[in-house]
Image (spheres, grey):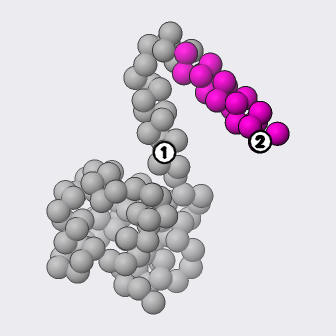
Amino acid sequence: MTDIKGRIQQIREELKISQRDFAKRIYISKSLLSEIEIGNRNINERTIKLITTEFSVNKEWLLTGKGDMFTSPPPDIQLEKLINIFNQLDQGLRDCLLEQSKALLKLRKKNKE
């Protein structure tokens, strides 16, 4: 069974998120996260709390490997990024993005048939 550093990597892989983005979301530097993942630095209680809160990770699983990885369905990082971009657009561009998305879905459906 893996240790905590391996489980942190597993979380990132499951969420398809880079070290840089993961570290940013839990308010630590990428270099500190890297040091934790390779075992050169110990993880503190604050960082554990941030990981479990930000990514809905089961604390027991993170610490021991027992139980489920997530306490609820994992956050969809790509969806969060899309929502962030969408929220930065003006209304005209939002409408355009929605119409383009609908067109892509129609095209995908047509190609499947």
Q: Nearer the viewer, residue 75 or 43?
A: 75
Q: Amino acid at mark 2?
A: Lys
Q: Quadrant of residue 99?
A: top right
How many circles with numbers are drawn on the protein? 2
Residue 33 percent coordinates (x, y): 24, 65
Asked if residue 63 is positioned above or below residue 29 in the image, the reply reads: below
- What type is the residue that disc 1 sits on? Gln
Left or right, 105 with respect to 95, comes to: right
* Direction right: furthest residue: 113
Stretch in magenta: 96-113
- Mark 1 and mark 2: Cα distance apart in space: 24 Å
Residue under the image location 48 percent in, 35 percent down: 82
Q: Can residue 37 be seen here?
A: yes
- Mark 1 neighbour class, 10 Å CA radius: few under 14, some 14 to 19, many 20 or more: few
Task: Classify 82 as above or below 76.
Answer: above
Q: Nearer the viewer, residue 25 or 30?
A: 30
Q: Which residue is mark 2?
A: 112
Disc 1 is placed on an element classified as helix
From the viewer's perspective, is residue 44 above or below residue 87?
Answer: below
Q: Image quadrant of residue 73? A: bottom right
Which residue, given by chain and number where applicable, does mark 1 sit on? 78
12 relative position to 98: left or right: left
SS majority, magenta: helix
